[in-house]
Amino acid sequence: MRGARHRGLAVAAALLLAVVTAVWSGQPSSASGETAAVEPLGVPFLPSPDPLHVTIDSMVAVSMTVDKNVTIRLSDGSTRTTTRYTFTKLKIRSHMSVVQRAAGHTVSIDVPGEGSLGGYDSAGKAETTTMWGNITNVCVRVLVKICGVQGLLDFFGSLIPLTAGAEDFTGDIYAIRTVDDHAALDSTDNPVHLPGTITVTTP
C-alpha cells in the first residue's frame, strides 16, 4: 500500500511540474519584436513545444472540418503555423496511444479498446473536439487499404464537413480540446471517454 501511495504521489508531482513548467515558460518574453497574430486555444495553459505523438489503430471522424495555416503560441513563447481539425466526435474504435517526451519525463496515455472525444450530450446537442497539429499518416479502405491520404482529407475537409472511418492514424499534435458548449451548470455529461491508463516516467 505504501509503495502504491508513493507511486501515486510521484505521478501527481510529475504532472504538476509539467503544468507549472508550461505556465511559467509561457510568460511573455522581454525580447523586443512584433508579436505574431495567434489563435486563442481556449485552454488554461499553453501547449508544450514538444508535441503529443498520437497513434490510433482504427477511428471514425464525425463532421470533421479542416483549417490550414493556423498560428498558435506555445509555452516557450514561440509560435507554430499548423492545421486545426474540428470534429463533432472523434470515435476511437481500436487502440489509441498518446506519448509526450518533454522536460525530462515521458507521459503516456494508452486506450486499448474503444473510446471517444466529443459526441452529443444528454440533451442531444453536439459537443466539439478541436485538435491543433499535423497528421503524418492516415489510411482509408475503399475496397483495399490506401495509406498516405492525409492530404486529400485536408483538402476535402477544408471544403465540406467529412465523416469518415480511418486506420493507422499518426499525428504530431500540440493540443486537443473537447468541450460541451451547451452544458448547463448542473450538467454531469462528460465529453471525454478514454478508458485506459496514464503513466509518467523519468530517466
Image (cartoon, grey):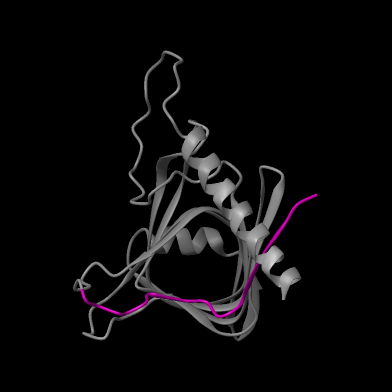
Residue 150, horizontal then vertical, whole percent: 55, 62
Give the farthest residue toward the top. Answer: 32
| Number of marks drawn | 0
- The answer to whether residue 131 is left or right of residue 58 is left
- Above/below status of 148 relative to 133: below
Residue 191 belongs to the span the image colors magenta: yes
- Above/below status of 187 relative to 86: below
191 or 58, nearer to the observer: 191
- The answer to whether residue 153 is left or right of residue 11 is left
Give the farthest residue toward the front. Answer: 2
**Residue at horizontal 42%, vertical 41%?**
72
Viewer can see residue 115:
yes
Report which quarter residue 192 is drawn in.
bottom left
Viewer can see residue 61:
no
117 or 46, nearer to the observer: 46
Residue 23, horizontal then vertical, whole percent: 47, 40
**Residue at horizontal 33%, vertical 32%?**
37
Quadrant of image for the N terminus: bottom right
- Above/below status of 191 relative to 48: below
The span picked out in magenta is: 186-203
Residue 43, horizontal then vertical, whole percent: 37, 51
Report which quarter residue 2 is drawn in.
bottom right
**Residue at horizontal 30%, vertical 72%?**
127
**Residue at horizontal 24%, vertical 67%?**
181
Residue 135 belongs to the span the image colors magenta: no
- The answer to whether residue 146 is left or right of residue 20 is right
Give the farthest residue toward the right. Answer: 203
Residue 28, horizontal then vertical, whole percent: 41, 26
Report which quarter residue 135 is drawn in.
bottom right
